[in-house]
Amino acid sequence: MVKPKYKGRSTINPSKASTNPDRVQGAGGQNMRDRATIRRLNMYRQKERRNNRGKVIKPLQYQSTVASGTVARVEPNIKWFGNTRVIKQSSLQKFQEEMDTVMKDPYKVVMKQSKLPMSLLHDRIQPHVRWRAPWQWNFFGKRHAYTLPNLSFAFPLENSNFNAVLLSFP
């Protein structure tokens, strides 16, 4: 008889199932799952025990809960306490003014590369893409209203062939 591998178990499971960690190695040999893999997969397959009201009586092995009021420690990491890239509003405005003068003069070049995002340099007023004009036709009934995006900021519709296509649509 083979010595049982689990504590508290007096007999060995004789089944040859792939989920049995005590199975005898057959013709598969080294290609079979080892004991740790079988135990891990069986652990994933388990379900928690609940009472008739649905409250969890016994949670899963890997779902331990921390009681409320316990002090938790987070492992300190140097990247959380290092310098962050912040800039004052006054220095940002000064940098914007200097970059505007450099951009206007074709003979000036910026040599020192900044780690500042270039999108901070321009305060562009972008058209609101979410604004939509109401669609003229109801294809699928009265209650199904569809909207057409307003493309007037991209190109004028009155001078293009796109307007003729839209107006000729039923």
Image (cartoon, rainbow, N blue to C red):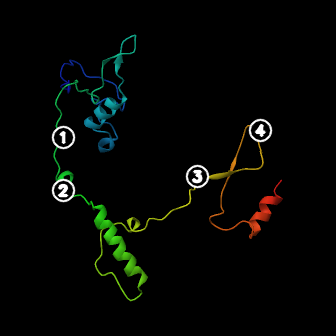
Residue on which the image places disc 2: 82
Instruction: Give me the C-alpha separation between circle 1 and circle 2.
Output: 17 Å
Q: Earlier in the sequence, mark 3 or mark 1?
A: 1
Residue identifier under label 4: 142
If you read the primary sequence from the N terminus, does the residue marked by circle 3 or circle 2 appear first? 2
- Counting residues from the start of the chain, the first of labels 1 and 2 encountered is 1
Earlier-in-chain disc, 1 versus 4: 1
The image's mark for residue 74 is 1
SS under mark 2 = loop
Question: In this picture, is 45 found above or below 111?
Answer: above
In front of the other: label 1 or label 2?
2
Q: Name the residue: 58% across, 52% down.
A: 130
Q: Is residue 93 left or right of residue 104?
A: left
Which residue is denoted by mark 3 in the rendering?
Answer: 130
Disc nearest the viewer among 3 and 2: 3
Amino acid carrying mark 2 in the image? Gly
Q: Amino acid at mark 3?
A: Arg
Percent coordinates x, y for residue 96 in the rendering: 36, 71
Q: In which quadrant of the rendered image does the N terminus lie?
A: top left
